[in-house]
Image (cartoon, grey):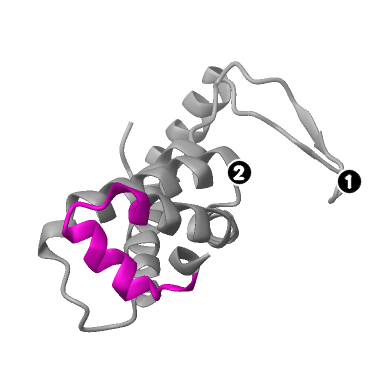
Amino acid sequence: MAAMARSDVQLMLDVKAGDEQSFALLLHRYRSPLINFLYRMVRNREQAEDLAQEVFIRVYRAREEYVPSAKFTTWLFRIATNLALNSLRDNRYQRMEISLDAPVTVDPEAGKRRRSMSPRSIRTSSSIWLSKRGRK
């Protein structure tokens, strides 16, 4: 019980001194809140769990340089925020990729048909665009 009453800063200082159980307590204390926080940013549960794991890996690796100049949670969630933003930035182009062979789909929310562009329509679109610019 006394271990749970220790402050986050004291736990982190104990981790810095080599106490593995203090790290386990921090992990237990912040795993769920961190996953929920990351999920709100990345909107993917699996990705949020992976990012939370990476946050704790970085906390553990930085244990020897830890200086309690700010609240532990401020430091922890800043690491999480930076990782989530990097992940969103790195993955934004993957979400934008479309398949040229993708079939026409119906968007249930908008009730509109979405056409995927076929190679023929891309050639036609690009030739129209180029002819408007005076090129062939």
Q: How busy is the neighbourhood of tag 2: few (under 14 within 10 Å), some, or many (20 plus)?
A: some
SS assignment at label 2: helix
Residue corresponding to mark 2: 45
Q: Amino acid at mark 2?
A: Arg
| Residue pictured at 23% horizontal, 67% vertical | 13
For the C terminus, the quadrant is top left
* Magenta region includes residue 80: no
Give the residues in magenta: 5-23
Q: Residue furthest top?
A: 101
* Magenta region includes residue 8: yes
Q: Does the magenta stretch mainly form a helix, a strand or a loop?
A: helix
In this view, the mark in front (2 or 1): 2
SS assignment at label 1: loop
Query: How far apart in space, not on screen, are marks 2 and 1 (Cα)?
Result: 27 Å
Q: Amino acid at mark 1?
A: Gly
| Residue pictured at 85% horizontal, 49% vertical | 109
Q: Nearer the viewer, residue 80 or 102?
A: 80
Q: Which mark is residue 111?
A: 1
Residue 111, position as x, y percentages in the image: 89, 46
Visible residue check, residue 39: yes
| Residue pictured at 39% horizontal, 64% vertical | 81
Where 69 falls versus 14 (above or below)? below
Residue 127 occupies quadrant: top left
